[in-house]
Amino acid sequence: MCRTGDEPEPTEIEDDAGTDAAFSALLEDSAEDLYESAPCGYLSTLMDGTIAKINATLLDWLSLKREAVVGRVRFADLLTVGGKLYHETHFAPLLRMQGELRGIALEMKGADGRRLPVMVSSVVKHSSEGDPLLIRTTVFDASDRRAYEQELLRRRQEAERARAEAERARAEAEEARRQAETDRERLADSLAVLQQSLVPSSLPAVPGLEAAVHYHTASPDRLGGDFYDLFSLGDGRWAFFLGDVCGKGPQAASLTSLTRYTLRAAALHDPEPAAALTTLNAVLQERYAASGDPRYCTVIFGVIQPDAGQNRCTVRLASGGHPPALVMRADGRTDYLRTPGGLLVGVLPTAPFSTAETVLAAGDTLLLYTDGLTEARTGPTRENLFGDDALHAFATRHAPATPNEMITALTGLLESFGDGLDDDTALLALGVPALPVTDRAG
């Protein structure tokens, strides 16, 4: 140490300079290194969500390759099914309106199927003229936070179970429970009657066409939101639809009723599938959006025209955010009938809907279903979703199949899910009867 007023010794100056140089060397990170190796994920997307830039941290979290992501997928494609739905219905619209969102909880999916809880913040970058150019997004790993929340929930559930066990030990509580059970059964009976009023009691007989249906209600205590119908348009044409409204309970029942009768009326006025969905979108917007409580649904609407003389049917379909129909051919081929471009019905004031067309020959079957089937939880831990690929494989194993055969097989599949089936599920199958063996031989 030098004395006050004295010059530092030369050795002290050299030591300080060496320390500063070593410390500066540690901080010589380039801006690119800081971006790529940041402790959080970064990505930039075009306004339509297409990923233009993504850092190595986020790619590593999701086990993805940069060349498979940049310019090829949208940010929403990296999310789980539920996260994608929330992004399209809430996150993206709010970001466009506000220009910035922070701390939004979402789930991303890795290439290996693993789910990653994340906290997402996004900012829209604008040009000097105020035009939106791109979206910058920061992603933080929220796995520890999710684990902490689940642990809190587990402890709370354990405490609630302990209290329930103590209450059951008391005679008065036991009597109250029995009375509550009786009331619940009465409520379930009432709800069952109301639920039946929201779907047809039976399907009509259609010349040259076979039809089968199954409806699974996840809980007897709540009204489901799935719906379907099959009805005549005259002139040998028949309309059909199947869908799922948002929410549960009385509000969902009201929306289901409005949706069914709107589609019926719209089809009789203009049977074009895209026109029927456009009418429904306008009705939902007028009924709910103005009140600040928007309601929406997914639905697939079609018109089928049997040609008994040719043993075939022409089918035209339009979809509003609904899973695609599955076509099982008489020769054993199974394919999804895609209806691209369809948005959730009721979310936006105007929504484009496109129409797809196919022909069902003798022995072909068309299957419509709600996402309760593909989102059923499977596996020992109930962490995996059944998914589109598994459904395609299941249908392929059973093809060719009549509508009744396919609905019977799928009913057994739903029962095998056990408590992994926690959502309502509606199934509707339409098919052309197979030709007798003698006719096929001729």
Image (cartoon, rainbow, N blue to C red):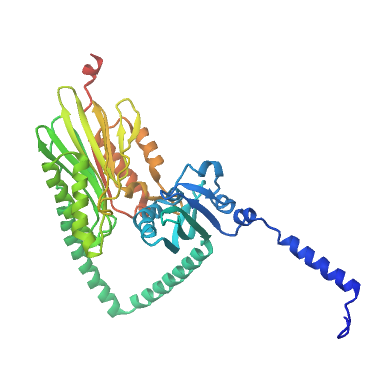
Q: Is 415 in front, or is 276?
A: 276
Query: Where in the figure is residue 132, as x and y percent of width and height?
Result: 42, 54
Lateral position of residue 58 relative to residue 267, left or right: right
The vertical placement of 333 against 37, above or below, is above
The vertical placement of 409 against 438, above or below, is below
In the rendered image, which quarter contains the C terminus?
Answer: top left
Lateral position of residue 209 relative to residue 49, left or right: left
At x 28% / y 56%, what residue is drawn? 246
Q: Quadrant of residue 395?
A: top left
At x 44% / y 62%, what residue is drawn? 105
Using the rendered image of the protein, determine whether residue 216 is visible from the camera's viewpoint. no
At x 26% / y 30%, what residue is drawn? 358
Q: Is 316 in front, or is 32?
A: 32
Q: Is 331 in front, or is 354?
A: 354
Query: Where in the figure is residue 7, as x and y percent of width and height?
Result: 88, 79
User: Which residue in the rendered view is the most extreme toward the front?
Assistant: 129
Using the rendered image of the protein, determine whether residue 164 is visible from the camera's viewpoint. yes
In the rendered image, which quarter contains the N terminus?
Answer: bottom right
Query: Where in the figure is residue 175, as x and y percent of width and height?
Result: 25, 76
